[in-house]
Image (spheres, coloured by chain):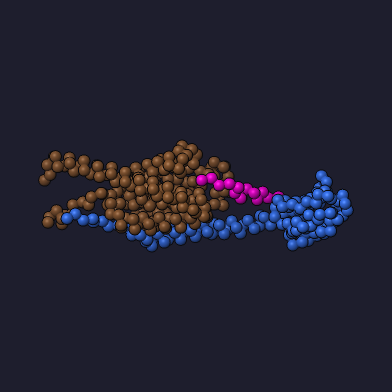
């Protein structure tokens, strides 16, 4: 039986832990995000989505609240880093990111035991690129562009989605903080008894 | 002693494979279909327009092999349409730039013989340009 004071201390501890985790993960994502822009790619406007690796890991380990905080902070601060906050390109990046987060969150919550890391990551990449393509087609009011680029987008989503799913899995395995959503390991039953 | 204890979902499942194959396969099929469809649209109506001065002298289908003598300022120029390609021969002009241009077969390509004031330009009645990209934003 815990006393009120202990319970409160535990509560504060867990909130501080969450805050620190979100802060660290955001920095991690930002580094990956900037790195992503620097890597030369066959099609420059389809990003690898390196930052999404961390988002997926957090969705699985730390829950959707922490993941959402990290994801959207990264999009916002990332736009400051790259320049172009609140420009049309930011809108493109933001809506793609939001859609991809939504799809991944739903997939992790409802489809995760059936789908693996790769499947969820692929769905996220697909949602991201699809949203951007639809917005571009709407802006140009030309659906031909969309029909023409759709297979390309699917191909690269497949490639990059598999890659980031694989990376996310191994990141979770190597960094238990991401896999559990805690900075300090929880006191296990066995350890508490000993 | 505190230890990390966690269980991760699987990296790759059978459902993943099905998902990848379904989405990848369907879009590949769609791409093939469009490619196959576009063959029919683009090959038919490509034509070459031949102008002498400001007047259109002839408009020929590229699919039909023909030879046409066009009266130019310095004499007759022979325009040859062969195998879907257009070329000028025997132009009687000093530099023979039009002959050296060689054969043209793509929409928008031209052969010009300035001394004879003759121009051949390939046009398509279907606007193929709408399907191609001219810029990239990132």
In the rendered structure, the colour chosen for chain A is brown
Magenta residue check for B22: no
Which residue is located at x 45 percent, y 45 percent? Answer: A96
Chain letter for the blue part? B
Is residue B115 or residue B129 the one in the foreground? B115
Lateral position of residue A3 relative to residue A137, left or right: left
Which residue is located at x 37 percent, y 61 percent? Answer: B13
Lateral position of residue B16 relative to residue B69, left or right: left
- Residue B61 x %, y %: 76, 56
Q: Is residue B18 visible?
A: yes
Magenta-colored segment: predominant secondary structure: loop
Give the answer, above or below, for where B118 lies relative to B36.
above
Stretch in magenta: B125-138
- Residue A160 x %, y %: 44, 55
Report the quarter where the C terminus of chain A lies.
bottom left
- Residue B1 x %, y %: 17, 55
Which residue is located at x 12 percent, y 55 percent? Answer: A193
For the image, the number of numbered tags is: 0
Is residue B52 or residue A150 the one in the foreground? B52
Lateral position of residue A132 relative to residue A165, left or right: right
Q: Which residue lies furthest to the right in this view?
A: B75
Q: Which residue lies furthest to the front in this view?
A: B95
Magenta residue check for B136: yes
Report the quarter where the N terminus of chain A lies.
top left
Snapshot quadrant of residue B30: bottom right
Snapshot quadrant of residue A188: bottom left
Q: Is residue A124 visible?
A: no
Is residue B64 or residue A31 the one in the foreground? A31
- Residue A109 x %, y %: 33, 50
Which residue is located at x 36 percent, y 55 percent? Answer: A168
């Amino acid at each position: 039986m815990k006393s009120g004071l202990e319970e409160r201390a535990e509560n504060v501890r867990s909130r501080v832990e969450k805050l620190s985790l979100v802060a660290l993960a955001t920095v991690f994502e930002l580094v990956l995000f900037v790195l992503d822009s620097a890597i030369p790619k066959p099609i420059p406007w389809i990003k690898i989505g390196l930052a999404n690796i961390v988002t997926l890991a957090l969705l699985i380990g730390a829950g959707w609240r922490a993941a959402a905080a990290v994801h959207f902070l990264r999009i916002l601060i990332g736009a400051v880093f790259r320049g172009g906050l609140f420009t049309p390109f930011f809108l493109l990046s933001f809506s793609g990111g939001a859609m991809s987060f939504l799809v991944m969150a739903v997939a992790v919550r409802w489809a995760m035991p059936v789908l693996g890391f790769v499947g969820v990551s692929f769905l996220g990449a697909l949602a991201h690129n699809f949203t951007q393509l639809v917005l571009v087609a709407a802006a140009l009011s030309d659906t031909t562009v969309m029909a023409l680029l759709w297979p390309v987008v699917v191909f690269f989503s497949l490639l990059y989605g598999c890659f980031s799913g694989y990376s996310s899995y191994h990141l979770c395995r190597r960094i238990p903080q991401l896999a559990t959503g805690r900075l300090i390991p929880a006191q296990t039953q066995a350890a508490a008894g000993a | 002693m505190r230890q990390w204890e966690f269980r991760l979902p699987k990296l790759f499942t059978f459902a993943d494979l099905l998902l990848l194959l379904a989405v990848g396969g369907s879009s590949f099929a769609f791409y093939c279909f469009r490619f196959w469809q576009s063959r029919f649209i683009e090959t038919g109506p490509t034509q070459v327009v031949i102008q002498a001065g400001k007047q259109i002298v002839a408009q020929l289908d590229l699919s039909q092999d023909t030879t046409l003598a066009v009266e130019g300022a310095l004499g007759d120029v022979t325009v040859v349409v062969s195998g879907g390609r257009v070329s000028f021969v025997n132009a009687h002009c000093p530099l023979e730039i039009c002959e050296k241009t060689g054969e043209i077969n793509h929409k928008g390509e031209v052969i010009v013989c300035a001394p004879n004031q003759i121009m051949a330009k390939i046009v398509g009645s279907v606007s193929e340009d709408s399907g191609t990209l001219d810029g990239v934003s990132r």
